[in-house]
Image: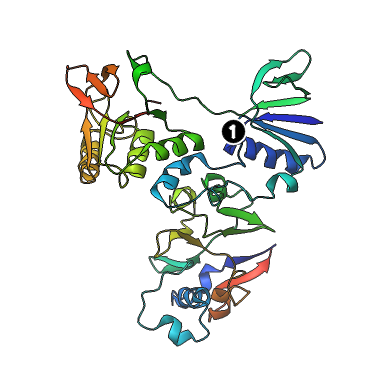
Amino acid sequence: MKYVIIGNSAAAIGAVEGIRQVDSDGEITIISKEPYHTYSRPLIYYLLYGKTDEQRMKYRKDDFYEKMKCNTIFGKAVTKINDKLQQVLLDDGTVISYDKLLVATGSEPFIPPMNGLDTVDKKFTFMSLDDAKGLEKSLSPDSKVLIIGAGLIGLKCAEGISRKVGKITVVDLADRILSSILDEEAAQIVQEHIEKYNIEFILNSSVKSFSGNTAVLSDGRKIDFDVLVIAVG
Amino acid sequence: MKRVYVNEKWCLGCHLCEYYCAYANSNEEDMVKALKDIVINPRIKIEEKDGISFAVSCRHCDEPLCVKGCITGALTVKDGVITVDKNKCVGCFTCILCCPYGAVSPTDEGIIQKCELCINNTKGTPYCVKGCPNNAIVFEER
């Protein structure tokens, strides 16, 4: 049996371990567009915070692929799946055939349409190791960071960088932070706690447009920033 | 595989297993040195209510939810024993929330600890069992 798995994070690794429980000989190929050994995505915040490093955030040991007898193709993206021929096409033109295919690619960050976003120089999403590395490089002790989204990703990002920057402002459309998991009373308590760490919230609000390093909010207020993080979902 | 099992009708609730656990995992040679003037934070804990008591520690489940839930890969199963790589653990406590037995707990340093059947300390065999005066916990194959 030839298994091909697209993706190299928790779901893909779980699949490899599951396959190997019942099939120790089948050929497994893991394809990932990221050029890294499997790492834990939730740890990108701990990486910025300094609680872990790139070696320790590996989701499985260095010899995992070898022990699980997996072929790995990293740094290449799948551009097409041909289910009739049971083949996948990579961005370098390579064709790989499969008997069973698993698409375990996770989600892409959602970027809402905002006018002038292309005029912002330093903008990031916060989902992958490359996001975290890019963000870290662009920060300085005086940076003003604007985070759009007061959900788990936005707040984890804020926590991770709070000791490294001058100021953080978090904007969210909802009337409270962590609106998907907290009610008003609980959200208020958590918000007051977070505000002690030099993190300011602007709720019931969204960014209408950007002009370089200035964001114009829906109520007309203007916010200057150096670095933008989009963490809407 | 051999696991730690409980005979709750023999448990006196003396808590000695907790002290033996703390001693074994301190890696101190001398029990007095290991336990003097400290509040112990053992990996086995006595549950007691209405005259019934028993020791609770990791069951080393065949399908461990703690391992499934671990976001770092710090928790792994090897030869049936679930162990934690303290170097990788960041203290997110997902495993503590996942464990149906309450058998995973925070360390004093803010990461997690759990029973590893004393395979990673100098004792090599479950010391809680060794210290139980009434055979209320046993280490055996079932």
For image coordinates 27% across by 26% down, the residue present is A172
Residue A117 relative to residue A99: left or right: left
Q: Position of residue A98 (x, y in %)?
A: 77, 25
Quarter containing the N terminus of chain A: top right
Q: Is residue A39 above or below residue B40?
A: above
Report x, y in % for residue B79. Answer: 70, 59
Q: Which of A17 and A40 lies nearest the eye of the viewer?
A: A40
Against B4, is A136 above or below?
above
Q: Position of residue A7 (x, y in %)?
A: 62, 31
- Graded by Cα atoms within 10 Å as few (under 14), some (14 to 19) or many (20 or more), the crowding at tag 1 reads some
Chain for disc number 1: A
Amino acid residing under circle 1: Glu
Quadrant of the image occupied by residue B61 = bottom right
Q: Would you identify the image quadrant in which residue A86 lies?
A: top right
Q: Is residue A79 above or below residue A45?
A: above
Residue at 52%, 68% (x, y): give it. B8
| Residue lying at 48% horizontally and 58% vertically, measured from the top left | B104
x 72%, y 38%: residue: A19
Q: Front-most of B121 and A95?
A: A95
> Depth check: A129 or B79 in front?
A129
SS label for mark 1: loop
Using the rendered view, name the quadrant where residue B139 is placed.
bottom right
Left or right of B142? Residue A201 is left
- According to the picture, the residue beneath numbered tag 1 turns out to be A34
Q: Where in the figure is residue A11, as x and y percent of width and height? A: 60, 35
Quarter of the figure with the C terminus of chain A:
top left
